[in-house]
Image: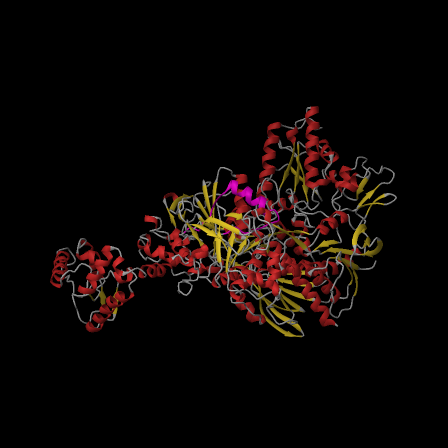
């Protein structure tokens, strides 16, 4: 087993630093169920059990500075299996939130800034967005059985509002068709919005509660304006 | 104390042990067991002797208590029976509801014809001890005759005409001077764990494995009856789990798994066995040596697996953390054994209400310092209804309760 | 016979037991090597005598009539009692040397730590001045829940009341006792830090100024840590007291490998020993928690109370020594697992202690011992003369299996219930213990046309007579040697072990043996 070279003097470590955090990390019995379930475990050094342990011991600085806590996708499988009910994904967010925002990994930082300013991570202008949606909708309507298909945008009074992952209007536009066809076949009364349509909340992902609130708030506002009761947020 | 009578609810290790102690002191016993067979869970356990040497698991002791019980004239045995009402007016009066007796124990010769001829798998159950008399019983839930009278093979084929498929349930009123509750535990059902129990045939529980080893002697994969090359044991399933509100160690699973693993290696040395654990608990007086020897034969991994996926030929792919490299590995096994925990009996709530007893937060009956019932009520508890216990502990618990009953009788007589 | 019970011990279990017995009117004698005994029972109807500063010298007789000789200050004390219970306390051996440490002002045992925490005087000050306390347990030899419980309670106290940081360094954390998992959580809530080791161990150094430095790699974070605790609390190994070992020897009671006064044998559950009338309870029989000791006391009281009924009638079917044949070689005396042989002017069997295992009869060089219904002739007469299961066409081996009543006989019954196919030429002969099998039995079976003989015994360590199966194995080995010498196939004889609840094993064994005999063909000894 290889270990880091310098020896940490436990006399200098304050184990009580994070005791007031609400994530129950001190209850950990090191069973490794989290790591056994985690799809990202082992990638670039990510280890959920190690993260919990370091928080419990109070070794927070190193976690905040390290890259590996940013590998986690926040899928929550760890929380699902943890027998001690530790909120491991929330713990990851907390660690991320402790970093200065400028030190947040590049793409996430830029994307979040874009979302806060423009309503989506790509800074995709409204007209371009609508064009892409209509373009792909036309392609769907050319397929047999979908002649009637239309992709509703900003439809007031719809039953279901759905957000969109930015890659679906960028590099993976084909993937829009899959769920559109399902909605059509289920005769769902759905819509997307022309603004603030971004589903990938890097406010959530980077542990930025304020940004997350803004993005969520915008979506809620739109639901109120368009009088839509239900939200589908696949991210 | 020949004029005294005790009603024992539960015919498992604790109930049987207590019955034997009480009749030794001339006290009459009514032993009421809800299933068709006495012996509880432990009667289905395999002997785990390895290299011709006893490992003190205690399974044969349950057998001994059971044999002593059925032979004794002062013990009246009620199988397929439940206690439904209990009232007290000086003595206890209990209503015992008995399932219909489909197979007459006086006529049955254990010829096995009914069991072999029955067309529905599991519609006829069998016992685990020669003292389960009769050795077979009709499973009311699966029997075709009881469903729609569409089959009567067992009754027609029985050479002793011992089977009657139309009897009625019966009820009896019995009086007792004391009641002992020994209704046992419920083995954790791991269906909701991500291990595929009841979805993958080759994922079984430790209880399933006990029965396979006891009845067949060799371990085989349930899916295709072949011998597994690699077996994984996963410990602490359903125990040490605050999410399930099971914040306790079930105490016996480490011993059970390691003993069974070594016993398998003894008969089938070519099988590779891996045990995934958290902390190995101490069991038996020679634990230090036993554990050392076990580690030579069995691979111990101190990590509990997260997921199990079924692969082709119904093998199991297990994901787990490798403590040495801190990587999450995938390995394929042929058979997975889940070491399930001891959890509160399903009837605990009903029994608590029936007898005005208190349950602890865990769902077990209170015991020890905080007695389940107020002192001097004449109601006593024994065995795993109070929490996880090994077989020796259960027998000791029953002895303690028997002593308490004796003292209660003496105190109330004077 | 006076039903008096003698209790060895002065600890919690002995006191619970005494209290329990007195409450139902029993007469008891408590004896201890301690100089004082502060046991004061509540109101009771029995009688109690307390003998302090007293050591056992000898114990003669058997259940119902033990003649005790003890000594105090060189004065003899004699008592006659119906039963004896050993309820001595355990002792703690410190484990300093296991960790490379020595006792010092900052390296103490768990017992010392407990004592200090209970003591409200100035002695607690070592904790008042400390900031970090380390508990070391289970890192060399495995720990035990009884120890973990004490550590956790101490750590909880130190964290909450003294505000220090505790570390518990262990290998396998033992939580297999009631309430320990919850207590484990409580200590963590209070701030205790647990460091568990699997394949590595911490390096523990004792410095010249007695301070302790610990360095280790934490297996979870892979970081190297250094720790200099102000106080190191080292676990202890719980062992039987020295006096318990003496008692075991004097009383002729089998002890286990660690010296606890009860053999490691399931037949001794709960509080029994190899000697009827002598029981062992509490910490003298195993490592126990408080709850265990109370349970043991109740079980010992239960057995005591039921004792007299069984002694009313003197059994007539016990071993009897023919005084005309006996040459006082003392073989039976040495072999009897139940110590049922007394050396009076003649060597006699004490009928209440005899369990009819038959070992003495099998091993007596003069054949001077007989047990009613268990003489070789009685046993062998179960084989009808001229019996021959030979079928017309194929050779059907006649196999005689001498089966121990506690294991093989029962396994055979279960095999029948489960529908296992057994050899049609199999004749099972029940014996109370395989130790009763002698050359007479085996040769007698071959003489009565057996083609093969099996001796089926309990597993080693599972024999009620402790050694019966070992003697059986030795006897069979000797006979096989003899067979080799005279040119008789030794494969016609087999000795195997099995358990009462294993029908499959029984079926496998007898079927495999039958196959061997078929290969060998009919025995040349057949008439």
* For residue B232, above or below residue B68: above
- Which quadrant is home to the N terminus of chain C? bottom right
Tell me if residue B298 is in the magenta stretch: yes
State the image quarter where residue B351 is shown: bottom right
Instruction: Pick whichever, A71 or C107, lies toward us.
Output: C107
Q: Which quadrant holds residue C475?
A: top right
**Who is closer to the viewer here, B115 or B259?**
B259
Q: Position of residue C186 (x, y in %)?
A: 50, 63
Question: Residue A159, can we see it?
Answer: no
Q: Is residue C450 above or below residue B81?
A: above
Tell how many labels: 0
Work out whether residue C145 can be spotted.
Answer: yes
Q: Is residue C260 above or below residue A234?
A: above
Specify whether C328 is left or right of A201.
right
* Whole-percent x, y for residue B398 in the image: 64, 60
- Name the outermost residue toward the bottom: B89
Residue at image location 20% in from the left, 62% down from the top: A115
| Residue C442 lies within the magenta run | no
Chosen colour scheme: secondary structure
Q: Is residue C267 above or below residue C189?
A: above
Q: Quadrant of the C terminus of chain C?
A: top right
Q: Position of residue A159 (x, y in %)?
A: 22, 69
**In front of the other: B138 or B178:** B178
Q: Residue B305: x, y in percent?
A: 42, 50
- In this rendering, would B378 be left or right of A36? right
Question: From which residue to which does the magenta span run?
Answer: B279-305
Nearer to me, C65 or C124: C124
């Amino acid at each position: 087993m290889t270990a880091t070279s310098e020896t940490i003097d436990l006399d200098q470590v304050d184990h009580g630093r994070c005791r007031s955090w609400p994530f129950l990390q001190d209850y950990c019995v090191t069973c490794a169920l989290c790591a056994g379930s985690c799809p990202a475990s082992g990638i670039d050094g990510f280890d959920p059990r190690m993260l919990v342990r370091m928080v419990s011991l109070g070794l927070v600085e190193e976690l905040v500075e390290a890259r590996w806590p940013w590998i986690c996708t926040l899928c929550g499988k760890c929380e699902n299996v943890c027998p001690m009910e530790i909120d491991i994904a929330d713990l990851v967010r907390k660690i991320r939130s402790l970093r200065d925002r400028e030190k947040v990994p590049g793409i996430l930082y830029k994307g979040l800034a874009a979302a806060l300013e423009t309503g989506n991570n790509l800074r995709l202008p409204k007209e371009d967005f609508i064009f892409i949606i209509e373009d792909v909708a036309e392609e769907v309507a050319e397929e047999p059985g979908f002649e009637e298909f239309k992709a509703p945008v900003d439809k007031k009074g719809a039953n279901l509002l759905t957000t969109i992952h930015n890659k679906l209007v960028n590099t993976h536009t084909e993937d829009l068709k899959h769920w559109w066809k399902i909605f059509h076949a289920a005769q769902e009364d759905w819509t997307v919005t022309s603004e603030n349509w971004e589903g990938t909340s890097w406010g959530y992902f980077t542990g930025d509660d304020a940004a997350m609130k803004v993005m969520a708030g915008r979506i809620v506002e739109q639901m109120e304006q368009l009088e839509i009761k239900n939200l589908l947020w696949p991210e | 104390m020949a004029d005294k009578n005790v009603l024992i609810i539960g015919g498992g290790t604790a109930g049987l042990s207590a019955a034997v102690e009480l009749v030794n002191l001339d006290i009459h016993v009514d032993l009421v067991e809800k299933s068709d067979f006495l012996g509880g869970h432990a009667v289905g356990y395999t002997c785990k002797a390895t290299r011709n040497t006893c490992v003190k698991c205690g399974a044969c002791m349950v057998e001994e208590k059971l044999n002593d019980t059925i032979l004794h004239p002062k013990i009246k045995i009620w199988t397929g029976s439940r206690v439904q009402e209990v009232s007290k007016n000086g003595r206890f009066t209990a209503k015992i509801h008995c399932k219909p007796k489909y197979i007459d124990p006086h006529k049955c010769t254990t010829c096995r014809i009914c069991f072999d001829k029955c067309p529905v798998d599991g519609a006829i159950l069998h016992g685990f001890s020669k003292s389960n008399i009769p050795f077979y019983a009709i499973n009311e839930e699966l029997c075709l005759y009881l469903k729609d009278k569409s089959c009567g093979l067992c009754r027609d084929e029985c050479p002793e005409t011992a089977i009657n498929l139309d009897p009625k349930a019966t009820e009896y009123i019995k009086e007792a001077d004391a009641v002992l509750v020994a209704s046992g535990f419920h083995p954790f059902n791991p269906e909701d764990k991500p291990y595929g129990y009841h979805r993958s045939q080759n994922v079984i529980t430790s209880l399933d494995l006990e029965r396979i080893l006891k009845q067949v002697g060799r371990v085989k994969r349930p899916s295709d009856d072949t011998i597994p090359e690699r077996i994984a044991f996963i410990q602490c399933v359903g125990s040490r789990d605050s999410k399930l509100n099971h914040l306790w160690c079930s105490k016996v699973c480490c011993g059970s798994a390691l003993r069974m693993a070594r016993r398998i290696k003894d008969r089938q040395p070519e099988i590779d066995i891996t045990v995934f654990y958290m902390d190995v608990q101490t069991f038996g007086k020679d634990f230090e040596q036993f554990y050392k020897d076990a580690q030579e034969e069995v691979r111990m991994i101190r990590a509990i697996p997260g997921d199990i996926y079924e692969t082709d030929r119904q093998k199991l792919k297990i994901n787990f953390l490798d403590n040495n490299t801190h990587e999450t590995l995938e390995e394929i096994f042929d058979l997975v054994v889940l070491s399930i925990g001891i959890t509160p009996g399903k009837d605990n709530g009903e029994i608590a209400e029936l007898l005005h007893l208190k349950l602890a937060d865990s769902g077990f009956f209170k015991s020890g310092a905080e007695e389940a019932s107020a002192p001097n009520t004449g109601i006593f508890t024994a065995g795993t209804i109070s929490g996880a216990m090994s077989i020796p502990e259960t027998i000791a618990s029953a002895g303690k309760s028997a002593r308490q009953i004796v003292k209660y009788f003496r105190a109330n007589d004077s | 016979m006076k039903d008096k019970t003698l209790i060895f011990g002065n600890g919690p279990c002995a006191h619970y037991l005494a209290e329990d017995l007195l409450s139902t009117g029993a007469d008891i004698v408590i004896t201890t090597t301690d100089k004082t005994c502060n046991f004061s029972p509540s109101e009771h109807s029995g009688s109690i005598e307390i003998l302090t500063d007293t050591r056992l010298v000898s114990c003669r007789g058997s259940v119902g009539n033990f003649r005790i000789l003890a000594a105090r200050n060189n004065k003899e004390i004699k008592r006659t009692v119906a039963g004896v219970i050993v309820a001595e306390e355990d002792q703690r051996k410190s484990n300093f040397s296991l960790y490379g440490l020595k006792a010092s002002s900052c390296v103490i045992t768990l017992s010392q730590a407990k004592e200090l925490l209970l003591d409200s005087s100035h002695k607690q000050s070592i904790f008042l001045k400390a900031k970090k306390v380390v508990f070391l347990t289970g890192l060399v030899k495995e720990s035990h829940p009884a120890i973990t419980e004490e550590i956790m309670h101490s750590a909880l106290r130190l964290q909450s009341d003294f505000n220090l940081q505790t570390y518990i360094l262990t290998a396998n954390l033992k939580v297999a006792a009631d309430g320990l998992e919850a207590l484990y959580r409580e200590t963590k809530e209070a701030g205790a830090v647990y460091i568990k080791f699997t394949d590595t161990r911490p390096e523990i150094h004792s410095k010249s100024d007695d301070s302790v430095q610990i360095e280790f790699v934490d297996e979870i974070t892979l970081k190297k840590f250094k720790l200099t605790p102000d106080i190191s609390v080292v676990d202890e190994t719980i062992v039987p007291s020295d006096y318990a070992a003496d008692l075991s020897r004097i009383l002729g009671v089998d002890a286990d490998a660690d010296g606890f006064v009860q053999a490691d044998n399931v037949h001794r559950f709960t509080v029994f020993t190899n000697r009827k009338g002598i029981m062992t309870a509490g910490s003298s029989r195993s490592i126990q928690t408080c709850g265990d000791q109370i349970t043991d006391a109740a079980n010992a009281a239960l057995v005591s109370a039921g004792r007299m009924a069984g002694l009313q009638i003197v059994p007539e079917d016990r071993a009897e020594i023919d005084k005309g044949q006996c040459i006082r070689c003392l073989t039976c005396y040495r072999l009897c697992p139940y110590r049922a042989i007394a050396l009076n002017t003649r060597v006699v069997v004490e009928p209440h202690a005899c369990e009819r295992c038959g070992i003495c009869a099998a091993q007596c060089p003069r054949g001077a011992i007989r047990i009613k219904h268990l003489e070789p002739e009685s046993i062998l007469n179960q084989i009808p003369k001229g019996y021959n299961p030979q079928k017309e066409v194929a050779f059907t081996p006649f196999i005689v299996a001498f089966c121990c009543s506690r294991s093989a006989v029962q396994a055979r019954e279960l095999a029948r219930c489960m529908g296992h196919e057994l050899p049609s030429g199999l004749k099972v002969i029940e014996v109370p213990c395989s130790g009763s099998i002698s050359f007479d039995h085996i040769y007698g079976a071959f003489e009565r046309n057996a083609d093969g003989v099996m001796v089926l015994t309990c597993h080693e360590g599972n024999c009620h007579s402790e050694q019966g199966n070992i003697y059986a194995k030795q006897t069979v080995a000797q006979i096989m040697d003899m067979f080799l010498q005279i040119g008789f196939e030794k494969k016609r004889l087999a000795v195997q072990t099995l358990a009462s609840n294993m029908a499959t094993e029984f079926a496998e064994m007898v079927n495999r043996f039958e196959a061997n005999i078929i290969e060998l063909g009919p025995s040349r000894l057949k008439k």
